[in-house]
Image: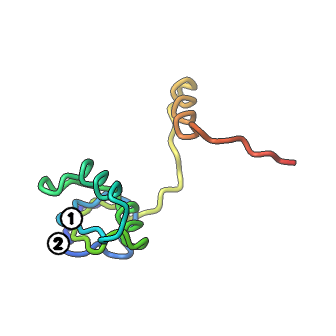
Amino acid sequence: MTHVSINGPLPKDIGTGFAEKQKWEFIENCHPVIPAWFRKHFAAESGSWARTQLLAFLIESGLLKSLTVREAIIALEKQTDVWLPEDCDQGCSVIGKFTQGAKPTSKD
């Protein structure tokens, strides 16, 4: 992970990581629950952090009219390996949490 200073709009090729939001503005005609939820979890005055993928999605989908970030912590390499604890009980708990609510697929 690398810490970078941006002080401007979120770069399109930011990659995986977290960005510290400075200012953001939602479009005027979006559902009022969307800005309310994000304002609740990402207080504007504190300059909170959010996943870069979420911020990129909000920009690409058109929900955000503008976004300014101060800095970011990003991964320079794509993650291809997954580490699980050697203890089977812990590993099963992690996998169960990630697949919670998933429906089995039929191979027929």
Which residue is at 22% across, 60% downward? 20
Mark 1 Cα shell of 10 Å, populated few (<14), some (14-19), many (≥20): some
Viewer can see residue 65 = yes
Q: Nearer the viewer, residue 73 or 11?
A: 11
**Image check: 21 left or right of 12?**
left
Quarter of the image for residue 59 reads bottom left
CA distance separating discs 1 and 2: 6 Å
Residue 105 x/y as whole percent: 75, 45
| Residue 7 disc label | 2
Q: Amino acid at mark 1?
A: Glu
Residue 24 x/y as whole percent: 23, 67
Discs 1, 2 touching: Cβ within 8 Å? yes
Viewer can see residue 75 = no
Q: How many marks?
A: 2
Residue 37 x/y as whole percent: 31, 51
Quadrant of the image containing the N terminus: bottom left
Q: Nearer the viewer, residue 44 or 91?
A: 44
- Note whether 64 is above or below 91 in the view shown: below
Quarter of the image for residue 44 reads bottom left
From the image, tell me which residue sits under label 1: 71
Q: Earlier in the sequence, mark 1 or mark 2?
A: 2
Q: Amino acid at mark 2?
A: Asn
State the colouring used for the structure image: rainbow
Quarter of the image for residue 38 reads bottom left
Q: Name the secondary structure under disc 1.
A: strand
Which residue is at 20% across, 75% downward? 8
